[in-house]
Image: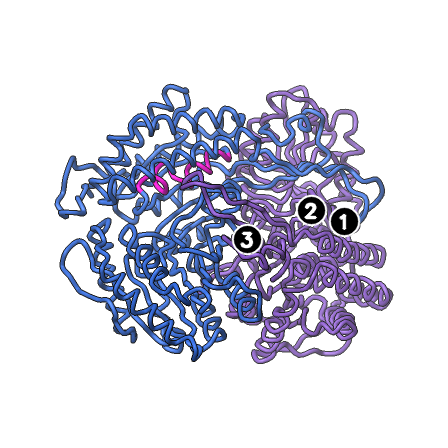
Chain colours: A blue, B purple
Amino acid sequence: MKLQTIDPRTQHPVGDVLVESSHAQIDEAVSQSTHAFESWSITTGDERAAYLEALALGLEAHRDELVKLADLESALGLPRLNGELDRTCFQLRRFANLAKSGAPFQFTDDPAVAGGPPVGHPAIMKVRIPLGPVAVFAASNFPFAFSVLGGDTVSALAAGCTVVVKAHPAHPQLSVMTMKVIEQVQTALKRAHVITMVQGHSFEIGYQLIGHPSICAGAFTGSTKGGAALQAKAHTRVRPIPFYGELGSINPIVALHAGLNGQEKDMATTLAASIAMGCGQFCTSPGVVLLIDESEHVKSNDLFVSELTTALGAQTPHAMLTPGIRHAFDSGVDKFTQSGAKALVHEKVASFEPKPFLGQVSAKEFIAHSALHDEVFGPACLLVRCASVHEAVLALRAVGGSLTVTLWGAAEHNAKTTALVRAAAQIAGRVLFKGVPTGVAVSAGQQHGGPWPSSTAPMTTSVGDDALDRFLRPVALQDFPTWVAEHQGRPI
Amino acid sequence: MKLQTIDPRTQHPVGDVLVESSHAQIDEAVSQSTHAFESWSITTGDERAAYLEALALGLEAHRDELVKLADLESALGLPRLNGELDRTCFQLRRFANLAKSGAPFQFTDDPAVAGGPPVGHPAIMKVRIPLGPVAVFAASNFPFAFSVLGGDTVSALAAGCTVVVKAHPAHPQLSVMTMKVIEQVQTALKRAHVITMVQGHSFEIGYQLIGHPSICAGAFTGSTKGGAALQAKAHTRVRPIPFYGELGSINPIVALHAGLNGQEKDMATTLAASIAMGCGQFCTSPGVVLLIDESEHVKSNDLFVSELTTALGAQTPHAMLTPGIRHAFDSGVDKFTQSGAKALVHEKVASFEPKPFLGQVSAKEFIAHSALHDEVFGPACLLVRCASVHEAVLALRAVGGSLTVTLWGAAEHNAKTTALVRAAAQIAGRVLFKGVPTGVAVSAGQQHGGPWPSSTAPMTTSVGDDALDRFLRPVALQDFPTWVAEHQGRPI
């Protein structure tokens, strides 16, 4: 199969035709990564930082060409893509600092206690070791920040793992150019093959990579279907490996009266922008809004719905990333309307730029129809009218798993807000009390990952400092000699 | 199906015939656990500690009857079982102290940083919440410490989860009696159904439990086959859940010359006792010993083999836990001899007490025959003669995953010991530099869990303080109101 850039704005092929990686090339990339792991896994924090910082400088030095190419392949626009490149460099430098500060080398010192068991025990030092070569599956919707040099790659590198990237076929030329920047750094620093790359359209490439005996973990950002298939493969290998998949999410917002009252228009405007931002192609795009129709609040809710209908109808989303995603958006919206959603904003258009969709259902309908819990990737949102906070809690439980839940108007502590916070935390990795869920800070406390179907490994995060932990396995060293003790958690 | 205690020493049925839990009873146990979770999940550390401490007192108050019943059902002997009950109470009190000291409520405070992204970000408090009702699958070989009130149960409770125990059919009466002790405590403290129990022989009971929509995680100690089957079910649910399985392990020992020279007899005596201890029915029983036959060391190695042959031949293991385990031991030993292992100690007997097995193979044979990497549960060990440290490293890689690797004679820092430490850490959760792997301390630094097939979740541990982490999922609270902040990581 060939790889061809399609300009999303025209859906015309542009640029060179690339060739998919062959079976032998994938083997070679993993073999190079395995060899590079021998020396990369025992680097110091400073050595890892030097490499990551050089990559950030490399991206910045080629900013204009990279961003231009990214825009041609993704249609995401120059301002957003410049911002995304900044974020990517920020991630590189943040994980460089984590490596320098010794985060991967933290250890638990558990000195010997005299006497017999269970009280007495030998000296133990619990360290963490890098897993080995990691397969990173790049996402379509963040051609920098969740792609070749994205958060998965960077956190794995800081942990001491090497990375084989499976580039996303939605931006093949950009992936090749990013890899050229990486190779310049690798040559300059004599760090060959710390990152290698394979690319292609076909599922077989992903399967071969995640099934390769030398691959020790997988990290993925993309659809629930794609992630589930790769996870199944990772789990049924002769030797199963961890698979960190960040999948689809519908990110419910619960709008309590206190969060809407008197600000119906402002909240509607903010929300409409969040739904349409990036043409809704965000894992944290708000797909469901629960309104609590306690009698005295119906009027405010109706006003909010009316304002949202106007505000979202006025949004003009840009072209979607790929023809496939564009097609899936229409199908997803059809499924909503077929499952009982009453359309408030809905215009079927043939253009590459979709019109936003806003639908409305009762909580009872929402709970009963699992098709209404599926993510529709793009600018689509469902309003769910709940008779009570209790019904909203049941609706959240029906969602089951989400990257985020947002609670508007929960500033006051009472039985209702308590019930909502509990229900939200039970199904989500992040609970917001203000604003909209789009925008995921790269920081110490971030948690990007929630129960299935939003991620395959909800005990871990794919964004933020703790993303590092996914690639380090604990090992207890017992009755260790002096020379081992002197390493103090650093590689032996 | 009926449940019947079989005395391992006579293989005769004894005591009452019990009835397997029905489908409806399992549903009821999960439903009770789900209901109990509502209040248990929001208990304080002191409340959890009071419950765990009362359980320890309850076990101690009924020590004599419990230990006597355990011995009747397991044949493990009174001294060992009294020690195991002590360990179980130690675990209960250790996790009580962890709860009191606030371990489950630790949180990351990530204050807001002014400015736009990527540098600026909102305030985030990253807390951890208990998963929900946990299915704990008790083990056969530790009727107290890894059974109804074992480490999995206790760590889940301290985390704020409720537990549905699937009792092990090898000690049904003891499980019932332990549950009676638990129910006394639950009645006295008004904590109904924090622990519930189901029991039976058939696979269906385990499948129903791990597949139940309200169960949020599974914890298992047992065979690779049983664990793999339950894990497959946990992963293919409509909503997959974490499954923490501690499975089989062959626990290689690498004996360098410096670790044997002049102490061949002592090391052989220690090792023989470790192989035969508890009739070899330990997950950390040493199943493989690698000897490095560099020319000047062959003599010492041969002496060690001769001493081990004598010492192991003199061991008289007690009856095995169940007829099934006894039968599997013979089959496993047959598979070793059929796969090229030369028997040094081997006597096939019909008695319930097996004779120990010691076999010998070359490293090349060991590496080539994957049947030689399988755990034989019981007093069996393979000596693997390696031409070099490099060959020993290859043999360790062939093992792939183990709870432990032990390195004798690695006190000196050189290229060989470095290579061995790296290879050992790459395949094991614990690396010992002294003694034998049997004996797993319950302490802050313990890591009991290694790469497949030794466990299903090698990033976690089933023994030691960090066992708690398996049952707490991180949640980032963003732009939280004051009343949420005041909880400081404690349940809302």
Who's the residue at 62% across and 54% down the image? B489
Helix, strand or loop under label 3: strand
- Could you tell me the amino acid type at mark 3? Pro
Who's the residue at 74% across and 46% down the image? B441
Helix, strand or loop under label 2: loop
Q: Do the residues labelled 2 and 1 touch (CB within 8 Å)?
A: yes
Instruction: Determine the image quadrant of residue B143.
Output: bottom right
Q: Which chain carries label 2?
A: B
Instruction: Determine the image quadrant of residue B405.
Output: top right
Distance from disc 3 to disc 2, alpha carbons, whole Å, reads 35 Å
Nearer to me, A351 or B154? A351
Q: Bounds of the magenta span?
A: A143-159
> How would you rate the neighbour count of disc 2 (Cα within 10 Å): few for under 14, some for 14-19, many for 20 or more?
many
- How many tags in the picture? 3
Label ID, residue A227: none
* Residue B324 located left or right of residue B203: right
- The correct choice, above or below, for A19 with respect to B241 in the image is above
> How would you rate the neighbour count of disc 3 (Cα within 10 Å): few for under 14, some for 14-19, many for 20 or more?
many
**Which residue, given by chain and number where applicable, does mark 3 sit on?**
B474
Label ID, residue B277: 1
- Could you tell me the amino acid type at mark 1? Met
**Which residue, given by chain and number where applicable, does mark 2 sit on?**
B285
Can marks 2 and 1 be said to lie on one chain?
yes
Q: Mark 3 lies on which chain?
A: B
Q: Does residue B162 appear in this view?
A: yes
Helix, strand or loop under label 1: helix
- Could you tell me the amino acid type at mark 2? Ser
Q: Name, please, the residue furthest toward the front.
A: A262
**Which of marks 3 and 1 precedes in the sequence?**
1
Question: Is residue A21 rendered magenta in the image?
Answer: no
Nearer to me, A61 or B234? A61
